[in-house]
Image (spheres, helix red, strand yellow):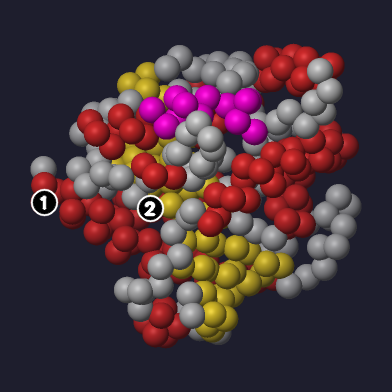
């Protein structure tokens, strides 16, 4: 953790909705004139798309049928921790981009499934925002959670997460339903081992729950809309959170526990703006006082 160079980590699995949270952060940063360095979690995958396919085949031959991007072996977690530590100390570090689809390939000028070269994070930023799979992970070899000043978990219920992943990977990345289903099943052990434990490390969790039937996510034709959802917002440390204010600003919301508020899904962006803006400004103001 760092006063002079704070880090915000947004953590969630593939299809959880972390990109939408990133967009809310973008809005806050523009409005409040905050200069942020953005880090994509996929940049720290160990293999490009072709390399990952070969690594999976090799792992399968050795009896491991569950080798996945969720696990430690498929990622450079030591390099990610090094980035967090280096940024916290000096406001610097190295990152890159992973090219997911045709649109990104066209914009970046690189092949789908490849990485761009490593580059230095832009200088003189107010904070670093990480979005990816492992922003609060703790293993026997690494402790990335300890370096982040604000950790956000994005955790829809599992069937909704799967629906979102299936729809995204089919429409945006060209996979079939069967291929996405196979990936979901292959990743499950690593999901339990590496993804779930992070949400006890996070400071705030946003969990979307559909209010329509999602019993079989593998045949669902539509993603439930915000109006067909509720969101549970859980605070690890509720002291200092003005719940009365949030309840007054978010109609039809209610407290489910002493550290949790439930809101209509359509109010998620407003809730994130109300909750995250003062937290971001606290980090930035604290930084500027010591600069």
The dot on residue 173 is: none
On whether residue 76 falls in the magenta region, the answer is yes
- Quadrant in the picture for residue 220: bottom right
Q: Residue at x 57, y 40 (%)?
A: 133
Say which quadrant the N terminus sits in.
top left
Q: Is residue 103 among what the camera can see?
A: no
SS at circle 2: strand
Numbered circles on residues, count: 2
Q: Is residue 147 above or below residue 219?
A: above
- Identify the residue at image location x=71%, y=67%: 210
x and y percentages locating residue 65 in the rendered image: 82, 28
Residue 186 drawn at (x, y percent): 79, 35
> Mark 2 and mark 1: span between their CA atoms?
19 Å
Q: Which residue is mark 2?
A: 150
The answer to whether 214 is drawn above or below residue 5 in the figure is below
Where is residue 146, by image quadrant?
A: top left
Q: Which tag, 2 or 1, sits closer to the chain's start? A: 2
The quadrant the C terminus occupies is: top left
Q: Position of residue 10 (x, y in %)?
A: 48, 48
Residue at figure coordinates x 38%, y 28% from the top left: 82
Q: Does residue 200 show up magenta in the picture?
A: no
What secondary structure is marked by label 1? helix
The residue wearing badge 1 is: 289
In the foreground, 233 or 86: 86
Q: Which residues are magenta?
A: 71-82
């Amino acid at each position: 953790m760092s006063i002079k160079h704070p880090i915000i980590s947004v953590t969630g699995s593939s299809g959880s909705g972390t990109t939408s949270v990133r967009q809310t952060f973008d809005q806050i940063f523009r409005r409040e004139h905050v200069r942020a360095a953005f880090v994509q979690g996929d940049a720290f995958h160990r293999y490009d798309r072709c390399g990952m396919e070969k690594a999976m085949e090799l792992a399968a031959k050795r009896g491991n049928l569950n080798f996945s991007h969720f696990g430690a072996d498929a990622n450079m977690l030591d390099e990610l921790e090094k980035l967090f530590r280096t940024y916290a100390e000096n406001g610097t570090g190295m990152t890159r981009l992973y090219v997911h689809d045709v649109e990104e390939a066209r914009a970046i000028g690189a092949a789908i499934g490849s990485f761009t070269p490593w580059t230095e994070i832009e200088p003189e930023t107010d904070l670093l925002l990480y979005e990816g799979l492992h922003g609060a992970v703790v293993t026997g070899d690494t402790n990335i959670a300890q370096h982040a000043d604000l950790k956000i978990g994005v955790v829809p219920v599992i069937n909704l997460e799967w629906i979102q992943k299936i729809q995204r990977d089919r429409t945006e990345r060209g996979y079939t339903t069967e291929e996405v289903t196979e990936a979901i099943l292959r990743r499950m052990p690593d999901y339990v081992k590496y993804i779930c434990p992070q949400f006890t490390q996070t400071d705030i969790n946003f969990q979307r729950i559909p209010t329509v039937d999602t019993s079989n996510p593998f045949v669902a034709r539509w993603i439930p809309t915000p109006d067909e959802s509720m969101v549970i917002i859980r605070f690890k440390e509720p002291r200092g959170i003005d719940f009365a204010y949030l309840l007054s600003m978010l109609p039809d919301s209610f407290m489910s526990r002493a550290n949790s508020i439930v809101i209509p899904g359509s109010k998620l962006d407003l809730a994130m703006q109300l909750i995250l803006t003062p937290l971001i400004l606290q980090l930035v103001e604290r930084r500027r006082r010591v600069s």
